Image (tube, helix red, strand yellow):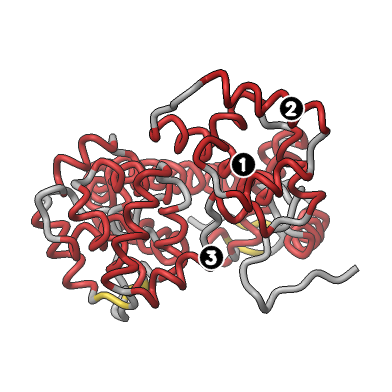
Amino acid sequence: MKYKMNKKTYEELNEREKTAILLISLGPETSSDILKHLNEEEIEQLTLDIARIKNVIPEIKEKVLSEFYNLCAAQEYISQGGILYAKEILEKALGTQKSLELLNRLTSTLQVKPFYFARKADSNQLLGLIQNECPQVIAIILSYLTPSQAGRILCMLPQEKQTGVIERIATMDRTSPEYIKEIERLLDQKLSASFVEDFTVAGGLQSAVNILNVVDRGTEKHILESLSFDNSGLADDIRKKLFVFEDIIKLDPRAIQRVLKDTDTQVLAVALKNATPEVKNVIFDNISVRMKQNIEEDMDYMGPVRIKEVEDAQQQIVNMVRQLEEEGQIIILKGQEEKLVG
């Protein structure tokens, strides 16, 4: 039996009309929260559809809610254990045909990435799985993780592997999906993505920069210094995109003052213990005479400081610079070609 709504059967409804019915069924409060996540054009179209709907037959409303629930459940299963896990659970609940239709709809829009399951894994566990692999394999895996997760793992890798891994990430272009599938198989993990026939883009210079942006100062310095010997051109390309402590001299005075405003003077004193004269001059030029005297006194009073403590203090300031840039409070010029206009 087919149910009609405004002269349309359930099977004849398009996705937007189903969404309109869903919003009506959920009520104004919940629907308004959902609409906040849509763009103006989508909101306008849905509003028109809602206005055209005079009434919703209970059977159609029930089918729409059921379909929405199944889509949400399928997406949750994918996030928990990947495509294969979702397929197994949904087949038991909905049957083979229905589950395939549902997963096809989701994977065509979600574009679930390879190694999606790894993003939920503990970094130490992942390290145990990949640390004995060759740099190329590690580079592929890290390219699909979040920069912060990949950065943590990179820090824990043996130093002799770190440079090779970041170099391969930076120079990586396109990787065959068959090769990626083979790596996943070797790691003995469930597949968590739907692969397209074309080549999958991963890695690249910006991917390497994003990862180096979140590693500790010591790891960053070691990798860039080693890379300068092996591939000086690539090291220069990375440095142009990567903000390091010494790049403070490239910030305009207002940006420097904004960074120093939120910087603890004790952290600043430690960070300047091993700083270049240029960096010290720029910092001291942007603080009061009294604060400069206090910092210099602190530096003299603390005596020798371990290089790790200096690097950690410098990294705190770098992290603050990067955070302020992300928030749009300061601007970091990435190269000579960039200029500011008033």
Type of amino acid at the residue the image marks with label 2: Gln
Question: Residue placed at 54% from the left, 43% from the top?
Answer: 65
Residue reaching furthest to the right: 342
Mark 3, secondary structure of its residue: helix
Rendering coords of residue 127 (x, y %): 20, 42
Disc 1 packing (10 Å; few <14; some 14–19; many ≥20): few
Q: Is residue 131 above or below residue 134?
A: above
Question: Residue placed at 42% from the left, 44% from the top?
Answer: 217
Type of amino acid at the residue the image marks with label 3: Lys
Q: Quadrant of residue 31?
A: top right
Mark 1 or mark 3, which is nearer to you? 3
Question: Residue placed at 15% from the left, 40% from the top?
Answer: 128
Mark sitting earlier along the chain (2/3): 3
Mark 1, secondary structure of its residue: helix
Q: Which mark is residue 283?
A: none
How many discs mark residues in the rendered view?
A: 3
Rendering coords of residue 62 (x, y %): 55, 42
Q: Circle 3 is placed at which residue position? A: 241
Q: Circle 2 is placed at which residue position? A: 293
Find the distance from the CA under tag 1 to the CA under tag 3.
57 Å
Find the distance from the CA under tag 2 to the CA under tag 3.
34 Å
Mark sitting earlier along the chain (1/3): 1
Question: Residue placed at 53% from the left, 39% from the top?
Answer: 314
Disc 3 packing (10 Å; few <14; some 14–19; many ≥20): some
Mark 2, secondary structure of its residue: helix
Q: Is residue 101 above or below residue 338?
A: above
Find the distance from the CA under tag 2 to the CA under tag 1.
77 Å
Q: Circle 1 is placed at which residue position? A: 58
